[in-house]
Amino acid sequence: MRAETRHQLKQDAFSRVTIGAAERTAHWSVEHRNTLAIAGIAVAVIAAAALGGWYYLSAQDEKASFDLSVAVRTLDTPLRPAGTPAQPDSPSFASAKERAEAGKKQFQAIVDKYPHTRTADMARYFLGVTSESAGDNAGAENNFKAVASTGNKELASVAKLALAALYSNTNRTKDAVTLYQELINHPTTSVSKVTAELQLAELYQTSNQPLDAKRLYEQVKKDNPGADAVQIATQKLAELK
């Protein structure tokens, strides 16, 4: 149940942040247009450079977004039963690890080819996901950290949630708690306060800290009347009795 819950939360967070952004071209440069009035030839030079940079990055991000959508579809490619040969006209993978490795190569290519785009940040997030799936925890940690440090707070919060889960799964409980607390104190649209609270409570529950887990579950029930989270918290509290 724990792994399934975390997977669903990660998928929901991703759906809100990355899929939509992958289907749009970059618009961030609008915020960085030069509005200073500079006399003479300097105006023309700076304006031309800024305009050229804007069009270049927009075009790059559009190309990167297309590549990202292709790479994401790779992760949805079905796995064929053991012993079943591959079919040329029906893409499939022999194992989840093989699929993760294929996706990992595609996401890395996006990061390498379009390093200064926002799409590259999303590709790096998936690079962390596929690295973890392929058993490369160090690579996953590095990529999640890189995304968590970006200026996109929505995507950064999703990366922090994934990083906290990685720490939890690799017995780095203290590091996981720190990240969950940060997400609780600074929630975003992508990772709500209650999402982080439920994950932290579950970590406490599986780390033999039942009192801390109970306190959080009860807080969730108090702060979210009528929400689906209440049902989850109620079930978890029943397990602690």
Image (cartoon, grey):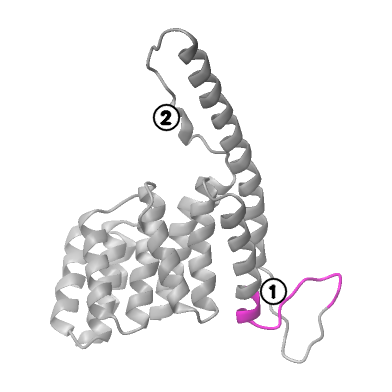
Q: Is residue 90 or residue 104 the one in the foreground? A: 104
- State the mark number for residue 78: 1
Decide whether residue 125 is among the magenta residues.
no
* Residue drawn where x is 40% and y is 72% of the image: 6
Dot 1, how many residues are within 10 Å of its Cα: few (below 14), some (14-19), or many (20+)? Answer: some
Decide whether residue 93 is among the magenta residues.
yes
Name which residue type carries label 1. Answer: Pro
Image spot of residue 86 (x, y percent): 81, 80
Name which residue type carries label 2. Answer: His
- Against 238, residue 222 (above or below) is above
Q: Which range of residues does the magenta coloring cover?
A: 87-99
- Against 18, residue 77 (above or below) is below
Residue beneath disc 2: 32
Judged from this view, the residue extending furthest toward the right is: 88
Q: Is residue 144 or residue 239 the one in the foreground? A: 144
Dot 2, how many residues are within 10 Å of its Cα: few (below 14), some (14-19), or many (20+)? Answer: few
Q: Secondary structure at mark 2?
A: helix
Q: Secondary structure at mark 1?
A: loop
